[in-house]
Image (spheres, rainbow, N blue to C red):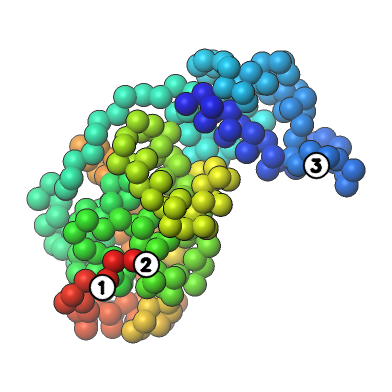
Amino acid sequence: MNRELGAFLRARRSEVAPEDVGMAGGPRRRVRGLRREELAELAGISVEYLVRLEQGRTTQPSGSVLESLSTALGLTEAERAHLFDLAAPRARPRPSDGVRPELARLLERVAGADVPALVTGYRLDVLAWNRLADALFAGLCRPGANLARYNFLHPQASALYPEREEVLRATVGQLRLATGRHPDDPVLLSLIGELSVRSERFRVLWAGRVVKERTHGVKRFRHPVVGELSLRYETFDVPGGAGQRLSLLHPEQDGVSEESLGLLASWGLSTTEPPAAP
């Protein structure tokens, strides 16, 4: 895991433009991003110590060092959490294979007919969903489905997202966070290995050590039946769910999205047979 910490620091260092942190840049620089000397100066640590960190030769750096590096690199909150996870992995509960029956019933009763809702695990396994989520995510909501496999491998997903690249980056970012929190999970590592073999785009994004955690925002869809719609999503941790998250989607106030989602709900779309596996 120390090697992962070093690789993450190198990847983030390469993404910081010197000009953005008040240092001289210019076209003659031979190093992409910050030099080690520059990052060490910004973080208030020695170059030798930073070299040991990036080479995985230092165990458990202090919290103050990690905070300084986070600030110097301008890490997001998700990236900062990932950095701390890599530096000092914590034991976390293993996920269950399903959601509580009460939560499954809640998806239909509380989410209602006009709000797509689904529960995913930290590996992005799809654990539960309501009728409208099944209609929205064509071909996804099936027993044993996984959102990462769907986004990268399923033919229907490539047409569903107008902004597919952002969806793919977010998917990789969530899996990268999961590996920091659960570094010894063989099922998670197997999933990453499978996607690396089957998707060149996944391999490229994974090598870039993208880290993202999406808790709210807007996602655009190009649905094969009702056309384009923009939905706001809110994602919540499920208490006692060992990494499970509940996602709810509702339409933007543009009139068109609300009408399209209402049409999707009124038709009660649901595939009767699962599509062929990607």
Amino acid carrying label 2: it is: His
Three-letter residue code for mark 3: Glu
Identify the element where label 2 is drawn: loop
Give the CA separation, mark 3 to mark 2.
41 Å
Q: Which label was assigned to residue 169?
A: none
Q: Position of residue 69 (x, y in %)?
A: 62, 27
Q: Indicate whether 62 appears above or below 106.
A: above
Closer-to-camera residue (48/239): 48
Q: Which residue is mark 1?
A: 275
Q: Nearer the viewer, mark 3 or mark 1?
A: 1
- Mark 1 secondary-structure assignment: loop
Residues at badges 3 and 1 in contact (C-beta under 8 Å)? no
Where's the C terminus, which quadrant?
bottom left
Q: How many marks?
A: 3
Q: Which residue is mark 2?
A: 154
Residue 64 in view = no
**What is the CA distance from the residue labelled 1 to the residue labelled 2?**
9 Å
Label 2 environment density (alpha carbons within 10 Å; few <14, some 14–19, many ≥20): some
Rendered residue at 13%/46% (across/down) = 100
Q: Are marks 1 and 2 in contact (CB under 8 Å)?
A: yes
Q: Position of residue 133 (x, y in %)?
A: 26, 67
Q: Which is nearer the eye, 252 or 241?
A: 241
**Image mark for residue 19:** 3
